[in-house]
């Protein structure tokens, strides 16, 4: 405690407690790391997040365990892997699309904090992040509807103003603002692309006009399919650059909303006793490997931002060690002084250390169970991407020499050695996942979309997750 007091005093923040009282977790759905200015984007997309990063620990190598919302959020909230919790966006059972729910036996971050006396509130942007999938079990207050970043931040600010101030709290925030389609409102300045005069310029105008009519039931899904996708089949480099500019512009909206959240944190005098985490559930593809959206397990989809501001360590730092979303639950609980449940599989990150000593750690990521299997094994220097139920097809990349993952080295001596190590790790992961699931009864329940509410089905159609 004396050491922590000295650290806080050295940062000009002697008021910070030995143990933070509260937790705010903000998940920006579909945000890839390299579009945040603090991670290298040359455009000024995130001045408020950058200011936050200067007082936080920025993890340069944080990765998602899946490329879909339901699976990654389930991993984040339970500190278990998708192969254990089984909460894929959708699976096909006997020809019918079904939607697994988190097992009641799963122990979530919100449940753990609620049982420790915390107020728990979730302000989410709908889609899969709802009570019906089990992802929000443990939250006393749930407001989940697809309304965008500004509305979700407004809801969070209202809750902060009306909470029970004598109690500790956990506030979870989630937005789909940077999820496709990228249709920033009229009047919003588009970052770069001023000289672009290709088909997506007209697609944007048509999408905006269509949305103004309010005659469309599913604006997210239909806007993308009707106006953008037809031009992406044979997209030019200029088209993709403009699409990315629209994505960056949506990110500025999130950043501005985040600035209002942080202003409220300061107004409520919460900065000195609240652990604040900003991250994403997965990234997004812009045809780096032939596809858009988030359908493959390359780094543009798996590499996510992660910034953690611990009030006891209010100084910016960058760390290069590998971190997984499953690590967030045990890390947050440890910082808050709450025991970590036995079901947790992640590591509690020592935020006071310059790096995780386990430098040879391998991270596993998996695709949705609804199609042919993909599995990724990421090490500090190499990345292997497997396809097929038996992991027979593989690509391998030296991510130091080839960060954009364009040169497959799986047949080189170094590449073959890593592939064999990765294949062994993948098989051990599968066996451990099954064992953990069976031991703690974490197998998912299955719910068909026909049993969902009309509003939830509509929102999932908007996001492109069901037909």
Image (tube, rainbow, N blue to C red):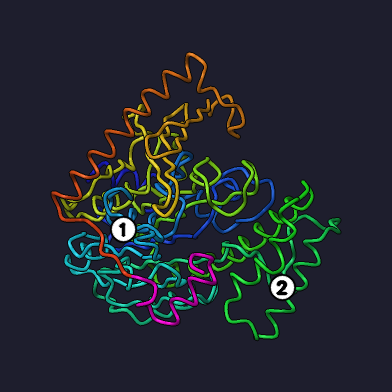
Q: Count of labels shown?
A: 2
Foreground: 446 or 348?
Answer: 446
**In the shown orientation, is residue 325 left or right of residue 102?**
right
Q: Is residue 461 magenta?
A: yes
**In the shown orientation, is residue 342 left or right of residue 6?**
left
Q: Residue 91: name its quadrant.
A: bottom left
Residue at numbered disc 1: 77
| Residue 148, x across and y down, in percent | 54, 72
Q: Residues within 10 Å of mark 2 (few under 14, many from 20)?
A: many
Foreground: 402 or 24?
Answer: 402
Q: Is residue 35 magenta?
A: no
- Res. 14 in view: no
Find numbered disc 1 in the image and state the secondary structure of the residue it sits on.
Answer: helix
Image: 8 above or below 425:
below
**In the shown orientation, is residue 28 left or right of residue 19?**
right
**Residue at the top extreme, as displayed:** 413
- Res. 38 in view: yes
Residue at numbered disc 2: 207
Q: Residues within 10 Å of mark 1 (few under 14, many from 20)?
A: many
**Residue at the left extreme, as displayed:** 439
Label 1 with label 2: CB-CB less than 8 Å: no
Residue at 54% x, 54% y is: 31
Of circles 1 and 2, the one toward us is 2
Foreground: 183 or 263?
Answer: 183
Task: Specify the principal SS of the magenta part.
Answer: helix
| Residue 372, x across and y down, in percent | 44, 46
Q: Earlier in the sequence, mark 1 or mark 2?
A: 1
| Residue 353, x across and y down, in percent | 34, 36
Q: Give the magenta part as a residue range.
A: 448-467
Mark 1–mark 2 Cα distance, whole angstroms, equals 35 Å
| Residue 346, x across and y down, in percent | 28, 44
Residue at 29% x, 53% y is: 329
């Amino acid at each position: 405690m004396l050491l922590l007091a000295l650290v806080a005093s050295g940062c000009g923040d002697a008021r910070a407690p030995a143990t933070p009282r509260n937790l705010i977790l903000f998940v920006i759905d579909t945000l890839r790391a390299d579009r945040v200015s603090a991670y290298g984007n040359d455009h000024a997309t995130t001045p408020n997040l950058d200011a936050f990063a200067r007082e936080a620990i920025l993890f340069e190598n944080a990765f998602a365990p899946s490329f879909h919302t339901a699976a990654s959020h389930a991993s984040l909230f339970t500190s278990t892997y998708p192969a254990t919790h089984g909460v894929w966006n959708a699976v096909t059972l006997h020809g019918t699309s079904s939607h697994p729910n988190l097992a009641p036996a799963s122990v979530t971050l919100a449940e753990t904090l609620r049982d420790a006396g915390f107020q728990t509130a979730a302000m989410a942007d709908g889609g899969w992040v709802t009570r019906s999938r089990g992802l929000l079990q443990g939250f006393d207050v749930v407001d989940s509807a697809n309304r965008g970043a500004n509305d979700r931040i407004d809801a969070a600010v209202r809750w902060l103003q009306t909470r029970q101030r004598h109690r500790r709290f956990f506030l979870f925030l989630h937005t789909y603002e940077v999820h496709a389609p990228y249709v920033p409102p009229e009047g919003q300045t588009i970052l770069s692309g001023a000289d672009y005069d290709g088909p997506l310029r007209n697609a944007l105008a048509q999408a905006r006009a269509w949305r103004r009519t309010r005659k469309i039931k599913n604006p997210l899904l239909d806007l993308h399919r009707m106006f953008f996708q037809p031009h992406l089949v044979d997209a030019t480099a200029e088209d993709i650059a403009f699409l990315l500019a629209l994505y960056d512009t949506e990110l500025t909206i999130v950043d501005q909303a985040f600035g209002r959240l942080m202003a409220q944190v300061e107004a409520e005098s919460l900065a000195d006793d609240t652990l604040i985490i900003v991250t994403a559930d997965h990234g997004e593809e812009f045809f780096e490997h032939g596809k858009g959206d988030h359908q493959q397990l390359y780094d543009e989809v798996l590499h996510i931002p992660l910034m953690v501001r611990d009030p006891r360590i209010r100084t910016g730092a960058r760390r290069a060690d590998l971190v997984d979303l499953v690590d967030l639950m045990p890390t947050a609980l440890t910082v808050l002084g709450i025991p970590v449940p036995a079901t947790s599989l992640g590591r509690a990150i020592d935020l006071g250390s310059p790096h995780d000593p386990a430098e040879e750690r391998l991270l596993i990521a998996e695709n949705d169970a609804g199609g042919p299997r993909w599995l990724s094994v990421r090490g500090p220097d190499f990345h292997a991407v497997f396809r097929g139920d038996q992991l027979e097809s593989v690509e391998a990349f030296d991510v130091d020499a080839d960060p954009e993952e364009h040169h497959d080295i799986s047949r080189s001596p170094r590449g073959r050695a890593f592939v064999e190590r990765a294949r062994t790790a993948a098989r051990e992961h599968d066996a451990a996942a099954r064992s953990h699931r069976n031991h703690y009864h974490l197998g998912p329940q299955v719910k068909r979309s026909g049993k969902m509410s009309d509003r939830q089905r509509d929102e999932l159609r908007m996001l492109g997750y069901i037909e």
